[in-house]
Image: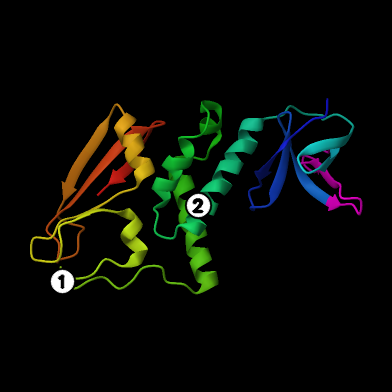
Amino acid sequence: MALVGEHGTSCRGQRTFIVQSHEYWKKRENANGQTVWWCCKHQSFACPAIIKSVGLRVVGQVPDHNHEGNVATALARQAVGAMKDQLGTQPLVRPSAVVATISAQLSDDVLMALPKRATLGRTLRHFRHMKNVASGETPLPPAPTDLNFTIPELFKDFLLYDSGPGPHRILMFGDLTLLDGLARADLWLADGTFKVVPSIYYQLYSIHFEFAKGINPAAV
């Protein structure tokens, strides 16, 4: 029975190949359509393992590995790559919301292999910043100066409620995936602040929930 692998993502965002708890980096593509991969430890451990694949199917394999495998680490890198992809396609979503959405689909061993939450947040914010710099885009419109502004199209996917323009305007934003997590969570955290909101607003009130030993935003 032929082995079947799955694609992962390296620390530099390159596609990798994961088979039987081991991760491989791309070496070359042959004229016959086969892709040759060598073990990701071929330099650090001088590992001789090489495989050939067509699509996700392994069609050739040479010497065994000289080290143990750890598929959780490879899948954790794959998850970080998925987080970056989601940030790239949804310019308004917060990195913390992306982490919560992707983490909800991971097993406990992969969650443990993820970088620390603070490190992961910095990585994703840096990725978004560099992407915006490279594209020359400014995803956020100018801040409003009064409460009679129109909600930009860019934000309408996150708008849950709008009482309408006027001096007592109430706005509620959230993500449906995270609201589903909120509905299933055992612990909710809610708090309001007056210090960090623009002067045209009275208060910012946020609702968070606990998931995977972390606190995730659901709505503001």
Residue 146's label in the rendered image is 1
> Which image quarter: residue 170?
bottom left
The residue tagged 2 is 86
Nearest the viewer among 157 and 43 is 157
Q: Position of residue 10 (x, y in %)?
A: 66, 47
Q: Estimate how packed mark 1 is, as few (under 14), some (14 to 19) or many (20 or more) residues with alpha carbons within 10 Å.
A: few
Q: Estimate how packed mark 2 is, as few (under 14), some (14 to 19) or many (20 or more) residues with alpha carbons within 10 Å.
A: some
Marks 1 and 2 in Cβ contact (< 8 Å): no
> Which image quarter: residue 40?
top right
Quadrant showing the N terminus: top right
Residue type for callout 1? Asp
- SS assignment at label 2: helix
Q: Is residue 1 left or right of residue 197?
A: right
Nearest the viewer among 154 and 94 is 154
Which label's residue is closer to the chain start, 1 or 2?
2
- SS assignment at label 1: loop
Q: Position of residue 179 (x, y in %)?
A: 32, 40
Q: Position of residue 90 (x, y in %)?
A: 45, 57
Q: Is residue 100 left or right of residue 83?
A: left
What's the magenta region?
28-47
Residue at 79% x, 37% y: name it. Answer: 57
Classified by dominant secondary structure, the portion drawn in magenta counts as: loop
Task: Specify whether residue 34 is painted magenta.
Answer: yes
Whether residue 49 is visible: no
Q: Position of residue 191 (x, y in %)?
A: 19, 43
Real-space Cα separation, disc 1 to disc 2, in angstroms: 32 Å
